Image (tube, grey):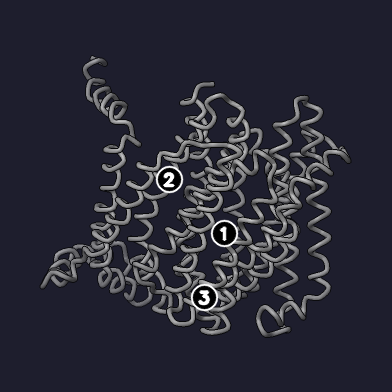
Amino acid sequence: MTKSSHIWQTFKHALIYSTAGLLGKAIGFIMLPVYAHYLRGEGYGTIGMIDVVLSVLTLLIGYGIQGAMTRFYYERETLEEHRQVVSSAIFVMLALTLSVSLPVVLFNKPVAYLAFGDSDKAIYITLAVFTFIADISSKNAETYILIKQQSIFFSILSLCRLVLALSLNIYFIVHLELGVLGYLYSGLIVAIFFSAFNHCYALYHVGLSFNKDIAIDILKWSLPLLPGYIAMFIRGNTDRVILRTTLGLSKLGTYEMLFKFATLIGFLVVEPFSKIWGVKRFEVAEKVNGPSIMASVFNIQLAILLFIGIILSLEIPIVLRILTPTEFWIAGITVLLAVMSRVILACYYHFFFGLLYAKKTHKVSIIQIASAVVSVIANILLIIPFGIFGAVVASCLANTFQCVLAYRLSQPFYRIPYDWKRIIFMSGLSISIFFLADWISIEKINGMTPWIVDTVGTPLTGFLMWIKADSIKDGKIVDYLVNNIPLLVDGGLKFIVGCSFLLGLVWTDIIPRKKLIAIVRQRSLSPISNT
């Protein structure tokens, strides 16, 4: 397979994976005002602390077993060995999940007191842990589908999971008004159903078998990552703990809402891409032109990340003002830093590949420990005086440090020739475009806001009344939409300016000019050729 074929296959599968994720997020946007009003800031803060507890369990297990399964799957040659790797990894994951999770269920009241300051919420911990067991124990079974590169099948499963989760959330949170408890009931039912399906599917194809030597190899590869996972937990939750203890659950809920939007870049780009690249890069690494393929893939992914990142940074503040109560409104620069911290984190997963390839997983833990120290210090120094803004600055600093260290340690084991000139240019261009677009607002033009409201508001009001929208909530929905017309116009203008980043991609040839011109010419000539 040629270099371009590997790149095309990677992004084709990533696009298929992202389709399901995009639909899920679109539905999430529609439901956001509903969840925000039913759960409020305290509800989001409670869910955030539940995530902290589950993060502790995750670090004790680590996702290293998933990576180990992929690594040894491609290292083995025969079909029987492939089956044994998958089956053994599934059993190892199940055993580890149960061993670290069940003690938390037994001591749910002390854990609830530590998490919420209220032992009466122990039922939250119990439901969340059982959901965790169902979800995590099936990760290797799910990874088997990814290894087989069955992107369409995987996406169909994701869509089915989305529909079921949405239906249950509406029933428990909106209809029964159970709040956080309804959120947990919904998650548990979905996790159990799809965990059972994933296990049945994988074991049906690979059979029930356990190879002790493979299991030992998997543990040897993944256990050195454990200190790193502990460091990741500390780094990933220091901000939450400090925000809760100093500013309260409500402010933590605002922070959780911010990152719910900021992590959209993960759902739209990073996760779909990782589903295919996480397994394919080990295959590509063995090719003669493997390093150059990896450098090209990184350039393309970074370009996509920066473009989506600009759009999200510009639109999230507007969306929050339209859809959520005032307690969730965040300034644009804070949103930019939150999104860019996720972009930087995505780069890290490219930079440390050489350590995984060379099986130097203990060095990954060293990177995580060092970056955790930076994160803790930065959060302590910045959150108390600057609040949420300080937390996102600390996140950017820690993720940048982690990338630099990963690059320096990984390159000697597997050198990837990154194109730093293009990388620096794209990064600088994206930030410049953000500040330009963020400055644009019709409110800065005298008389523009009332003119737009009068010009657009009248026909919009007529249309809404024609479809009987004025009968909803005594006409409040009509007033709400008309009053937000200036925000919608601002959002459209910012989006147009943000799209100018694509011109920069053409200029740097990330989007190849020759191919683009050829496509345009082919499109323009196609009617003639058809005649």
State left or right for residue 91 relative to residue 333: right
Q: Decide: few, some or many residues near mark 1? Use Cα within 10 Å; few <14, some 14-19, many ≥20.
A: some
Location of residue 22 with respect to 288 vertically, above or below = below
Depth check, front residue: 91 or 374: 374
Mark 3 secondary-structure assignment? helix
Residue 150 seen in the figure: no
Residue at numbered disc 1:
166
**Dot 1 amino acid type:** Leu
Q: Nearer the viewer, mark 3 or mark 2?
A: 2
Q: In x, y percent, where is residue 160?
A: 60, 48
Does the CB distance between marks 3 and 2 fall below 8 Å? no
Of residues 258 and 36, the one drawn nearer to the viewer in this rendering: 258
Mark 2 to mark 1 CA distance (whole Å): 31 Å
Which residue is located at x 52 percent, y 34 percent?
Answer: 10
- Does the rendering let one see residue 178? yes
Q: Considering the image in quadrants, where does the C terminus appear?
A: top left
Label for residue 253? 3
In contact (CB < 8 Å): disc 2 and disc 1? no
Q: Which mark is residue 499?
A: none
Residue toward you, 465 or 183: 183
Earlier residue among tags 2 and 1: 1
**For residue 294, above or below residue 180:** above
**Labels 1 and 3: the sequence-earlier one:** 1
Crowd rating for badge 2 (residues with CA inside 10 Å; few <14, some 14–19, many 20+):
many
Residue 174 placed where, x, y %?
Answer: 55, 71
Q: Nearer the viewer, mark 1 or mark 3?
A: 3
Q: Which residue is mark 2?
A: 302
Q: Disc 1 to disc 3, how far (Cα)?
A: 21 Å
Q: Secondary structure at mark 1?
A: helix
Instruction: Say which element carries label 2.
Output: helix
